[in-house]
Image: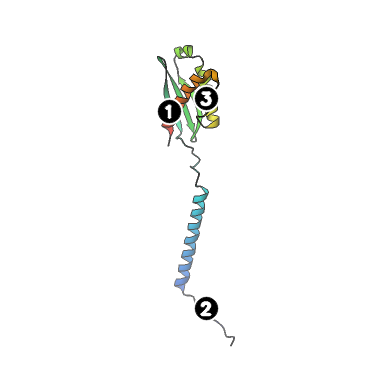
Amino acid sequence: MSGTKFVVVKMKELVKTAVFAVLGVVILAGLIYFFLHLGDDGGDGAYRDGTYYVDMELGGETAAVAVTVENGKIADVALSEQSDSVAVFYPLLETAVEEVSREVTKNQSLTIEVSPQNAHSSQLVLDAVAEGLEQAKR
């Protein structure tokens, strides 16, 4: 009684199984990709690239602060326009901008430590940078 056994496989069932297997692999690969890149924002950071200008009122004068964003991150903070009277009446402003620029670009945050000598000027610059970053938000 050890006769030959035949297995009959219908072509329709074979194709259906192959389609479901391929579909399962595609769904599984998609889920893996999704969960691996769940926290990524494309590497672009939180801001749109560009240079954003904010006018800063200093008594009766105005100085413009330029906030530059590259690859979604804060790249630079600088004074873009200032009159001679601003340089004369606010001599620590340039130092405050340099200090704020260095700390903000290093930390990528507006929560920074500033020197007590430039606390008021640094706060004015930080407020201007915050306004520029608000313009740059995605």
Tell me the SS state at disc 3: helix
User: Is disc 2 in contact with disc 3, using a CB cutoff of under 8 Å?
Assistant: no
Q: Decide if residue 5 is on the left or right side of residue 133.
A: right
Quadrant position of residue 61 = top left
Amino acid type, callout 2: Val
Q: Residues within 10 Å of mark 1 (few under 14, many from 20)?
A: some
- Residue under circle 1? 131
For the view shown, which residue lies furthest in the left direction?
60
Tell me the SS state at disc 2: loop
Q: Measuring 48% from the left and 68% from the top, which residue is drawn there?
A: 17
Q: Earlier in the sequence, mark 2 or mark 3?
A: 2
Q: Height in image: 31 above or below 60?
A: below
Cα–Cα gap, marks 2 and 3: 78 Å
Quadrant position of residue 51 = top left
Q: Which of 85/131 is in front?
A: 131
- Residue under circle 3? 100
- Residue under circle 2? 7
Where does residue 68 sit, x and y in percent of width and height?
Answer: 48, 29
Q: Earlier in the sequence, mark 1 or mark 2?
A: 2
Where does residue 78 sit, x and y in percent of width and height?
Answer: 49, 23
Where does residue 125 sit, x and y in percent of width and height?
Answer: 47, 23
Q: Measuring 49% from the left and 54% from the top, which residue is drawn there?
A: 31
Q: Height in image: 29 above or below 76?
A: below
Amino acid type, callout 3: Val
